[in-house]
Structure formats: structure tokens, C-alpha cells
Amino acid sequence: MEKTVLTAREAAEIMRISPTAMYKLIREDKVPHISLGRRKVIPAVRFYKWLDESVTGG
């Protein structure tokens, strides 16, 4: 079954960046996320769309 949301750590692994870097992107509102109290989750479909649209160059 496909995940509907990703944790910040899972999204960081997909992008091959550190969890700290992912949390920084979240704090700066540069990546789509949902706040659940202090917890942040990332809607999987929106994340992959954002990632695809962030590509620059050839």
C-alpha cells in the first residue's frame, strides 16, 4: 500500500539530504507539509509533484 504522508525523515531519505536539512526546508515553507501540533508530515502526492516541478535545467 502506498503511503499518503511521509515523515520528514522519509522525505529526506528520498531526496538524499539530512533530516536536519529537510526540517529547515519545512521551517522555511519551501516544501509542502501539514502541521499536526509539533509534528510535521508531508503529503506524498504533493511532495512528489513539488519535487518534479523543482527540477531545473535539461
Image: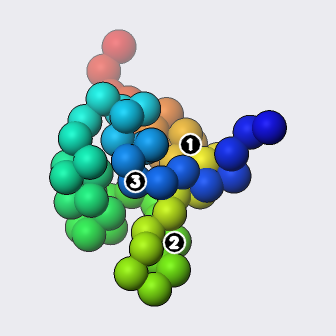
Residue 38 drawn above or below residue 26: below
Q: Is residue 18 left or right of residue 6?
A: left
Front residue of this view, candidates 51 and 42: 42
**Quarter of the figure with the C terminus:** top left
Residue most extreme to the top: 58
Q: Are marks 1 and 2 in contact (CB under 8 Å)?
A: no
Which residue matches tag 1? 49
Q: For marks 1 and 3, give the CA distance.
A: 16 Å
Amino acid type at image mark 3: Ala
Would residue 46 be seen by someone viewing this image from the given angle? Answer: no
Which residue matches tag 3? 8
Which residue matches tag 2? 34
Look at 30% across and 21% down and name the residue there: 57
Amino acid type at image mark 1: Lys
User: How many residues crowd around disc 3 within 10 Å: few (fewer than 14), some, or many (20 or more)?
Assistant: many
Look at 56% across and 42% down and name the residue there: 49
Point out residue 34 in the picture as x, y percentages from the top left corner.
51, 71
Protein image colouring: rainbow
Q: Is residue 39 left or right of residue 6?
A: left
Q: Nearer the viewer, mark 1 or mark 3?
A: 3
Residue 41 drawn above or below residue 52: below
User: How many residues crowd around disc 1 within 10 Å: few (fewer than 14), some, or many (20 or more)?
Assistant: few
Q: For marks 3 and 2, give the CA distance.
A: 11 Å
